Amino acid sequence: MIKKDIIILGIESSCDDTSAAILKNEAILSNEIAGQKVHEAFGGVVPELASRAHQQNILPVVDTAIKNAKINIGDIDAIAFTRGPGLLGSLIVGTSFAKSLALGLNIPMMEVNHMHGHVLAHFIDDEGKIKPQFPFICLTVSGGHTQIVLVNDYLDMEVVGTTKDDAAGEAFDKTAKLLGLPYPGGPLIDKYAQLGNPDAFSFTAPNVTNFDFSFSGLKTNVLQFLQRNTKNDKDFIENNMNDICASLQQTIINILFDKLIKATRHFNINEVAISGGVSANSGLRKRLKEEGLKQGWTVHIPRFEYCTDNAAMIAIAGRYQYLSGNFAEQSVSPDARLKI
Ligand code: KG4
Ligand code: ZN
């Protein structure tokens, strides 16, 4: 018997991006993302505005994903949606939409943990890219999370290290704000850092046990550093933007890699992946490649579009739930603090 292709609609709405994707087996046919400019003026995501924008975006985004995948709505076998973690009001929009559509089409649905999605994005077909072998270690770095995840199988993963306070993405965004850069500042720090000297300034690294992280001290350290230097030179930031960004970025990357290296040695694992929005950072990607050669790791770096929030990763994570027969009930509700 010829096995039927499985077509999954993925829906992601955990923060400020509304996204829908169509996955056929392990290949992405479409991956649409509607961002929300409305938050820029506020220097961060405003939850109420985010859920309103999701409501406006969700239907056109799903519609476009179906059209661009060149399938009919009736071809969809199942719907995968993000149940959490994330902003409750945002999650409600994606969850309710998925539930209604699954009911209307009379097809099953799968609830996906957003963090599983980031990790499992590595299993999307991508020409020339080798998929990770189990077990592997994944450093998941995003705006809301910083985790070292021990991945034993598609649906069996364990967080072995996490942040005690701010996430790596917040470390980028909050320090960028101190430099007067708009939200989200991570990509801008990356841009300026490429032109600067990473050894120009030094910032303190935290002292945290095990494989855990802390970034709140860095923010205070940067604030005091800027106050000290702008006292006598009001143009200090402007004149040193590239060097400050390069030094900051290097500090964050060093903090992350210190623990990542420790974890790989402790668990004796040489398959290492990165994921999440911050894995789009050029310095982080370069360092992983360098460290891979040095430590003898096989490294896995996702395509840019699968680093930041997207529904393709939710669809692929949903596929493994589908294959295991883990379906969600219509009574499912979002969980803003859903754990891996
Ligand atoms: O995974 P993501 O899209 O959303 C969350 O689940 O949080 O991650 C967003 C985070 C933001 O903090 C953003 O500044 C950061 O990823 N980010 C970057 C870069 N691109 C996105 N940080 C540093 N360098 C980048 N190139
Ligand atoms: Zn994310």
Image: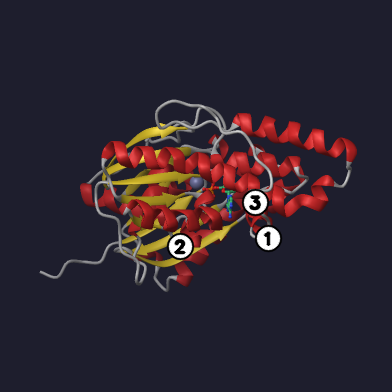
Among the two numbered marks 2 and 1 on one chain, the one whose residue lies closer to the N terminus: 1
Dot 2: few (<14), some (14–19), or many (≥20) neighbours within 10 Å? some
Report which residue position mark 3 lands on.
246
Q: Are marks 2 and 1 in contact (CB under 8 Å)?
A: no
Residue in view at x 36 percent, y 62 percent:
23
Tell which of 6 and 238 is nearer to you: 238
Amino acid carrying label 3: it is Ala
Report which residue position mark 2 lands on.
303
Amino acid carrying label 2: it is Arg
Locate residue 42, reporting x and y percent: 75, 42
Q: Quadrant of the C terminus?
A: top left
**Rendered image quadrant of residue 155:** top left
Q: Label 2, label 1: how many angstroms apart (C-alpha)?
A: 23 Å
Residue in view at x 43 percent, y 37 percent:
259
Report which residue position mark 1 lands on.
195
Tell which of 143 and 155 is nearer to you: 143
Locate residue 51, reporting x and y percent: 61, 43
Q: Label 3, label 1: how many angstroms apart (C-alpha)?
A: 8 Å
Among the two numbered marks 2 and 3 on one chain, the one whose residue lies closer to the N terminus: 3
Does 81 sit left or right of 58 as displayed? left
Position of residue 252 relative to residue 106, above or below, is: above
Q: Disc 3 on helix, strand or loop?
A: helix
